[in-house]
Amino acid sequence: MTFSIEPKIINPPKNRHDYQLSEVIRYRAWVEIDRSALQQNVRKVKALLAPKTELMAVIKADAYGHGAVKVANSVLEAGAQSLAIATIGEGIELREAGIVAPIMILGAVNTPEEVAALAHWQLQPTLVQIEQVQIFASVMRRLEQRLPVHIKLDTGMSRLGTPWHNGTKFVEQVLEAPNLKIASIYSHFATADDPNPEIMQLQRQRFQQAIAELKSKGYHPPCLHLANSAATLSDRSLHYDRVRVGLALYGLYPADHLTDKVPLQPVLQVKARIAQVKTIAAGSGVSYGHQYIAAKDTRIAVVGIGYADGIPRNLSNRLKVSLRGRLVPQIGAITMDQLMIDVSEIPEVKTGEIVTLIGKDGSQCITADDWARDLGTISWEILCGFKHRLPRIIISNS
């Protein structure tokens, strides 16, 4: 097996993106995943829930960049009852790793080939339109199996989902297919992270109205769920039978006004090694385009991480990293595989020293939220941006 990192790996694992700290001697850059923090976050979120409310851990997009298989095992061990992902491929990865917990697919599945794969890998899809019902029923009838499915109502997100006011008709069509079994009915909030609850409450009312209509016709859904991380933290009355929590499990808050609801610990840290240290003369340009010109003789360090690893190039000349517990500025354009930092104020910096880009280093703490604010985006995008060539290393040091 060929690895994209240097240097030699001892006893490489089956999944090249998952490493134990003891298995790696030296490498240029990596992501550390604090298993203790992750499991503590799971337990803290569960403590907010009613006794009969289940926790579904959302681990789509490689567990928001944290490493899906390792995260899945950790959250299930800590008390999550089921998992949510976006694609069939993500589900197959988990099943091949030996994970047997219920897995729900949040994304669309529309072809007969995909339906057959769902049945084979025991993955539970979301249904949003009648065309799916016809395809699913046909395939499952041929396979002589019964497939659990989840019905999604669009109550205001205007994304996937059957219109909430057509919910009863849609559910009745699914119930007519004997090879399909409704496992749950759910919807998704568009503004749960907004301190103004007006839109969220409207979506809740629509969801409740749709469910009430179903019950009036004699159908009682086996499981209802509506709350994402923000709704889970903000309002216990939104928990229903299950909550779908993603970001909060990774130790980040969906909005600033939710930070006092429960103490969460960031799970992910990004680190890299210094590849070279040198002094450049006053007037020297740094990196492509010479966007940075040294005003004086400057001691710089070249760090072995770049935009191909998920460091946004738009942070060039704005990023700050931590070295020996001190913040230092990144200078020049961030390149594909390296970036440069000014270490003039730190004495005798050596090749091989570790730089923290996200995480704690002494008294310094740099978060994905910090990057998101600087870029005008959200922490979800930052976390999902870290590429697979950064090994995910599991630690437990909380």
Image: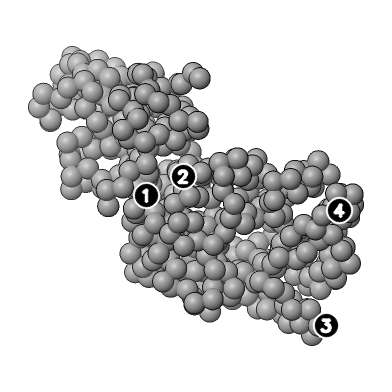
Q: Is residue 81 left or right of residue 371?
A: right
What amino acid type is highlighted by mark number 1?
Arg
> Residue 186 — which label?
none
Sequence-first disc among 4 and 1: 1
Residue drawn at (49%, 65%), measured in percent from left and top? Answer: 230
Residue position marked by numbered label 1 in the rendering: 35
Sequence-first disc among 3 and 2: 2
What amino acid type is highlighted by mark number 2?
Lys
Query: Does 182 appear above or below 116?
Result: below
Residue drawn at (49%, 18%), measured in percent from left and top? Answer: 2
Element class at badge 2? helix
Pointers 2 and 1 in contact (CB under 8 A)? Answer: yes
Q: Is residue 51 left or right of residue 224?
A: left
Can you give x and y, in whole percent of width and height, for residue 334 in the image? 38, 26
Sequence-first disc among 2 and 4: 2
Pointers 4 and 1 in contact (CB under 8 A)? Answer: no
Foreground: disc 2 or disc 4: 4
Count of numbered marks:
4
Q: Nearer the viewer, residue 152 or 43?
A: 43
Q: Could you give the CA–CA distance between mark 2 and mark 1, rounded to whole angstroms? A: 9 Å
Q: Could you give the CA–CA distance between mark 2 and mark 4, rounded to whole angstroms? A: 34 Å
Foreground: disc 3 or disc 2: 2
Pointers 2 and 4 in contact (CB under 8 A)? Answer: no
Residue position marked by numbered label 2 in the rendering: 70
Residue position marked by numbered label 4 in the rendering: 144
Query: Does 398 appear above or below 197?
Result: above
Element class at badge 1? helix
Q: Visible in this render: residue 377?
A: no
Q: Visible in this render: residue 124?
A: yes
Q: Is residue 161 left or right of residue 179?
A: left
Foreground: disc 4 or disc 3: 4
